Image (tube, rainbow, N blue to C red):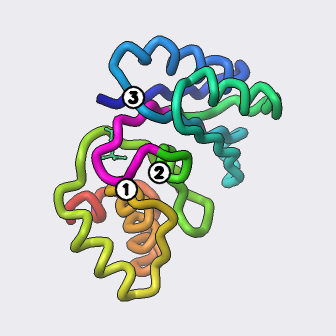
Amino acid sequence: MCGIVGYVGEKKASDILIKGLHQLEYRGYDSAGIALNENGSQDFLVFKSKGKVSVLEELVIDKNPMFSTGIGHTRWATHGEPSSVNAHPHVSNSDEIVLVHNGIIENYADIKKNLQAKGVKFQSDTDTEVVVQLVEYVMNKKGLDLLTAVQVALHQ
Ligand code: GLU
């Protein structure tokens, strides 16, 4: 069962997210990741690794990112092997939307096939990535803001 942690504030988000992910380790997981962002900008820093949160922590400490907003995830794979590519967060093709998710997208294969037929590319084998690419597709196709695009996408 995965774990999700988020932070918006003035402190160094990576420290808080890593601490939160350590606290969620008891739930079980096979990989972990965080995405960081500063002041709502559309530039994200993403760190992901297979294995323990301590492995992820080493990656993040090396870069010492000072951003103050972020999300983190511990993954228990259901679709796609445990790997850093399949670890969450997943990022849309424009790099502007970042997503973590707990659970299963039952109809992901149909949605993925439809999006691929329209030229949308995928990086991972997960069901989760389908949602972030679908939200972006809906935003662009219908000219919607993020909130509305999420609502439309979730109907599928
Ligand atoms: N189904 C998703 C995956 O395989 C999420 C698994 C989870 O809840 O950690 O990436």
Q: Which residues are magenta?
A: 73-82
Report which residue position mark 3 lands on: 29
Residue 86 or 65: which is nearer the viewer? 86
Q: For residue 94, which numbered disc appears in the image?
A: none
Report which residue position mark 2 lands on: 86
Residue sitting at 65 percent across and 41 percent down? 47
Dot 3: within a 10 Å radius of its alpha carbon, few (fewer than 14), some, or many (20 or more) residues?
Answer: many
Q: Give SS at disc 2.
A: loop
Report which residue position mark 1 lands on: 126
Residue sitting at 36 percent across and 59 percent down? 131
* Tag 1: amino acid: Thr
Q: Is residue 33 visible?
A: yes
Kindly tell me whether mark 2's CB lies below 8 Å from ligand 1: yes
Q: Position of residue 7 (x, y in %)?
A: 56, 26
Kindly tell me whether mark 3's CB lies below 8 Å from ligand 1: yes
* Tag 2: amino acid: Asn
Mark 3 and 1 residues: CB-CB less than 8 Å, in contact?
A: no
Residue 42 or 73: which is nearer the viewer? 73
Q: Position of residue 93 (x, y in %)?
A: 56, 68
Q: Position of residue 52 (x, y in %)?
A: 53, 25
Residue 49 higher or lower than 8, as above or below:
below
- In space, the residues marked 3 and 1 are separated at their CA atoms by 15 Å
Kindly tell me whether mark 1's CB lies below 8 Å from ligand 1: yes
